Amino acid sequence: MTTDLGCVNLRWALALFDGLIAGGMRQLVLSPGSRSTPLVLAAQRQPAVTVTPIVDERSAAFVALGMARASRRPVGVLCTSGSALAHWLPAVIEAAESEIPLLLLSADRPPELRGWGANQTIDQTRLFGVQVRAFYDPGTPEATPLALKQIRALGRRAAAESLGAWPGPVHLNLPFREPLVPEPSCQAAPEPQPPLALSDSADSLPSAIPAQARHALQHFTRHSGHGLICCGPGQWSAAGAAALWQAAARLGVPVLCDPLSGLRFGAASPARITRYDSFLRHPTTATALKPAWVLRIGRAPVSKTLLSWLAEVPTLLVSTSGSWSDPNYDVQQKLALDPATVCAWLAAESEINAADRAWLAAWRTAEQHIAQLAADYLAHAPWCEGQLIGELIAQLPADDGLLCANSMPIRQLDTWSGARAQSLRLFGNRGASGIDGQASTLAGLNAAGTPTTALLGDLSLLHDLSGLLAWRALERPGIVLNNGGGRIFDYLPQYGLPEFTTLWRTPIDIAFKDLARTFGLAHRQVSDGVGFRQALAESLQPQQPAGLIEVVIDGDVSRQTHQGFWRVVRGEV
Amino acid sequence: MTTDLGCVNLRWALALFDGLIAGGMRQLVLSPGSRSTPLVLAAQRQPAVTVTPIVDERSAAFVALGMARASRRPVGVLCTSGSALAHWLPAVIEAAESEIPLLLLSADRPPELRGWGANQTIDQTRLFGVQVRAFYDPGTPEATPLALKQIRALGRRAAAESLGAWPGPVHLNLPFREPLVPEPSCQAAPEPQPPLALSDSADSLPSAIPAQARHALQHFTRHSGHGLICCGPGQWSAAGAAALWQAAARLGVPVLCDPLSGLRFGAASPARITRYDSFLRHPTTATALKPAWVLRIGRAPVSKTLLSWLAEVPTLLVSTSGSWSDPNYDVQQKLALDPATVCAWLAAESEINAADRAWLAAWRTAEQHIAQLAADYLAHAPWCEGQLIGELIAQLPADDGLLCANSMPIRQLDTWSGARAQSLRLFGNRGASGIDGQASTLAGLNAAGTPTTALLGDLSLLHDLSGLLAWRALERPGIVLNNGGGRIFDYLPQYGLPEFTTLWRTPIDIAFKDLARTFGLAHRQVSDGVGFRQALAESLQPQQPAGLIEVVIDGDVSRQTHQGFWRVVRGEV
């Protein structure tokens, strides 16, 4: 046995990574520190792991979140002891709500230093409380064969739990005694692990689902009256989506596709409906299309119009999530089954009812009518988000990603995106729906291999300034809507309150040009359609610095344009 | 009874502020949001409260921390529901460790929306776990006389608990049902509260201390052998400090004054020792000055040299803190008494032992010797932190503040500051000793009325970029040591490891000139003593924009200079 404790630390940390890698981890985002040194040394020695250093731990966790969101693999994030890991909490909450596999590896002081007033020592135990799926504090390293076997197993287990039936963040708090650096004589190397076959569970569609669930599905979809499928934020494999469209065709129902459902862009089906947030504002249409039942898949949709229109409609929720998504309290039953499996079963088992064709046709008519109405309206309206989003959806290359920030951008995209036949992966941190971490998430999405553009509000960008440090390498631009603060409040009852601008809208007086220069980013400022088209085209050129596209938009004009469109939709003008 | 729920929300929120104000709160830092609207409206109607809007909640909490640190009053921080409050965690941890009164006011969705998949809704209950002194979730607002009385009482109670025997953060999670904006007819006004007499407890020095404690103090300070008093990070009133110096004089012992003890700058005493981190590196001196007992006050000192030299010395800890500061495991007994009270009692009761004069004289000799050695050394050394800190301590106006960041700056200040007769309030976030939140803390310290300069490392500044948004109004500069990353690692065993620069030192390639311009700040770049003297003098001029002083320092030269000085100190050269 070695008496070099630094070597023990390293060998134990290496074994942990053996397990994490066997469990599917390939990316590690780390922030600098001293106590975390054995883990950093171990990560360096693991050729299977790509290490990305990010100084600000808050940004680091959102970068990891973006990587895990795009790759659907567990991603590690590593930091030193003290308040460092506290900066992870916002991303941990988003990961918990969005069910993203994050492996939180915090270095810690050993037990004998905790609570004795030692420097940079806080109580890290269960720091993330109920926001993580599991928490482990495996004690201090040893290098016996049994201890190494145990920590390897913990690595596999933590990775598996992060990817499990209810994916999410898992926290490993890892204490180290000094010395943290091994002697030069230390022999330590990773132990090759049997590779884990990571399969996209939605790709395999077992036809067998429990009898009770079959009964519920049959009973529900044969209700007296027309139904619909509502797909909120979620993920579909190609096979899963195909099963969904087949099921919809057999049932003769429309599929209302949330912008984050993954269904708006790509292989088309007549059942795909994307413009409900607009046409459901028309009272007669809203009444005519009211369904008798809803099969809901994924999280609740972004559209408030849709959500309140669905109130009182009996709902069957299909979800393997450990959360319970029923904000209207209409869920009659939750089937804890993979939606793709359920769709495949429905596609095979459902009776075809000819009368349902008229129902689906009515939805198609509403969809096409509003698409034409929007096109006509935007052709004559002042240039703002509507035209911008149309241009963006048209120009982004096939299979690209688009990160859409919360607050106004996702709502505007919901209104204006429509559908497109080419694939486009739309990403949004819609778990907690914060304006935080957007710049860092973009860097993470790109680092995971999906070239991804961002559509951000000005406050979102400024909430995550240090995320810009990771933008230099990006091949896709960040588009920031510079419209003078949090314009979502312009649409809420707060609009016009005393000190409205100072305390709610909170515009920030900053020169984006200087901001871009600070971070070594290209900067393009545009304020009309021609300018935006050109700036976007330039930014998407290979070998061109992408950087920041600053879109100057008059928030008041934008508001009038949106509200004008809704008046048109409601038939008021 | 009103049926306007928006009005009920507002009246209840007003009553909460009545209580918080009665409990001493005068400042509120808020981040924009919708759910928090009743609280914002209530704060606006409370003339006793100054409201500061800060968009990034992480920055907001550190601004509040700075305000509370300087004012010693409870400061409120307010945000909306969702991941917003998660950004407070780093500042909450610092407040908990540093015992700073923060009132964390998070708006929340009402219970019926929590856990049902509603947007921007997370489990906010006990989000800060053991990091807060108390947590309350008082339920949804009502406007009955009893409900208003209850929430007023909770405000007083929370403020009192934040200031209590063990000060720290207190979390109030406040749910609101819609509508959040009252009807125009709503009548709601604050109810004047009886003013609370906030006294600085250290100003009153009750001579009575428990018999058991008196016995312990007498027994301890009459040990066979010489003792010393070690004052770590803490606070002293003028009366308390006077009592300390009297006690030291009667006991004939030196007082080792940590840079953050509040004792290095201001009214002098021969007992004040500040250069121990240097002269205790000299083996003979270290042996000669080894004490038989230590009376420790406040947190553990910054100096590792001092701390390890004190190991094995029997220690009496005087502290009212709920924490237990004993990183060497030498504390024989902890007296949970106010240090000023203890000092006053010692000053009155201690026997004067003439023999002790030689002991104190030996300490004075060491202090003066090293001061001269440092002056001689710096006169011929390359210009770096030593000369810079000397200049800073000399130039800063009386009663000013100086925020010193963690990692290298506080250690360098520990080495080079010496003492000065004029008062200077030295601040440092030494609770968790993070490099986080420094720019925001500076803004908060200044907002509390103490003109405060900052001495920051480059990584510290870049860790809190959004804090720079609050710098435009500052009358004192932020001084950033641009030395190419985390130079503390240059002094640790990690120095020279593979990928040392990329994974530990992590320099950030950013132009501080552009950074300053982005935030509308003056920028002065200096790299020598003449330049720094002039830049500092300019920045301290009234009516001059203070902004950012970028000090370009060659980290390698600095390291050689420091290590050269320690060789001189150890008598090796």
Image (cartoon, coloured by chain):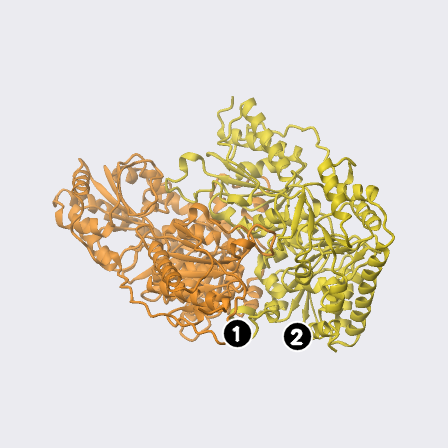
Chain colours: A yellow, B orange
**Residue B33, above or below B345:** below
- Name the quadrant of the C terminus of chain B: top left
| Residue sitting nearer the eye, A118 or A165 | A165
Q: Secondary structure at mark 2?
A: loop
Please state the chain letter of the residue tagged with numbered disc 1 in the rendered image. A
Q: Secondary structure at mark 1?
A: loop
Q: Give the residue number, with chain letter if any, for mark 1.
A: A497
What label sits on residue A327 in the rendered view?
none
**Residue B187, above or below B206:** below
| Residue sitting nearer the eye, B185 or B128 | B185
**Residue B81, above or below B37:** above
Find residue B26 and report its horizontal and vertical position in percent.
37, 66
Amino acid type at image mark 1? Leu
Q: Give the residue number, with chain letter if any, for mark 2.
A: A554
N-terminal-most mark, 2 or 1: 1
Find residue A126 and report its horizontal and vertical position in percent.
49, 41
Q: CA distance from mark 2 to mark 1?
A: 20 Å
